[in-house]
Amino acid sequence: MSRLGKKPVAVPNGVKAFVESGLVRVEGPKGKLSQVIPGGVSVKLEDNTFTFQRPDDSADSKARHGLVYALVNNMVKGVSEGFSKTLEIKGVGYRAQIKGSSIGLTLGFSHPVDFPLPAGVTAKVEANTKLTIESADKSLLGNVCAKIRSLRPPEPYQGKGIKYSDEIIRRKAGKSAAGGK
């Protein structure tokens, strides 16, 4: 199942990594992250390189082997480079603005929506309709973007709402002209 788990993860310059009993901590220019390692997989740090060992070849061990590799690799990438996602807001009068540590969204409701950003997540707004969310933690970034998108998901008839920049909305045709007999 896991071929990636056999690959080592190199720690770049400027990033400090620590392995304690069942816990991996990584510190870098973009932040600090830590992750509890699921049982059954051992993680070793030698010469600024993480290596992963599984106890046997059962399907569960192979799955955890790949999971631990992905978690540690994402942590190292996150603290060194960071992750970002771009959301687009489409609709007449729909816009976003930064208000301190929250995002103010006008989405066609009778009231504006304030979305507070959790610690470790930053946002930038370009041209009132492009929202770029950045974080060192990939899973936290994905959760925040999904929550923002769920405030007004794109609808298939006119395409109004919040969508990912690389997302393609399948459009539907509206009703046919009324009165045909």
Image (spheres, rainbow, N blue to C red):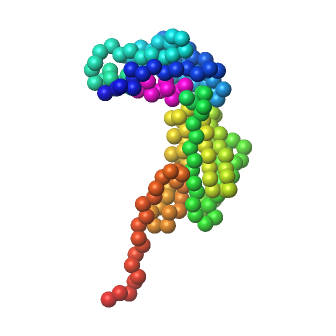
Residue at point 48%, 52% (across, down): 167
Q: Which corner quadrant of the image does residue 81 belong to?
A: top right
Q: Quadrant of residue 117?
A: top right
Q: Which residue is rendered at x = 49% and y = 67% of the image?
A: 158
**Residue 44 place in picture, x, y as percent:** 47, 12
Considering depth in this image, is 90 or 99 the residue closer to the camera?
90
Farthest left residue in view: 58
Q: Position of residue 110 (x, y in %)?
A: 61, 63
- Residue 19 in view in this figure: no
Q: Which residues are magenta?
A: 67-76
Quarter of the image for the N terminus: give it: top left
Viewed as shown, does residue 163 lie left or right of 54?
right
Q: Is residue 13 above or below residue 147?
A: above
Q: How many marks?
A: 0
Dominant SS of magenta comes to helix
Residue at x-position 63% and y-position 33%: 120
Quick one: which residue is furthest to the right in this view?
100
Observer-nearest residue: 156 or 99?
156
Q: Is residue 93 above or below residue 22?
A: below
Magenta region includes residue 72? yes
Question: Where is residue 170 drawn, in percent x and y?
Answer: 42, 60
Compared to residue 82, the image places residue 13 above or below, namely: above
Q: Is residue 54 magenta?
A: no
Residue placed at 55% from the left, 22% from the top?
A: 34
In the picture provided, is 119 more to the left or to the right than 19? right
Q: Which residue ends up furthest to the bottom in the rendered image?
A: 181
Q: Position of residue 64 (x, y in %)?
A: 37, 23
Asked if one can make out residue 61 in the rendered structure from this viewpoint, the answer is yes
* Quadrant where the image shows the C terminus: bottom left
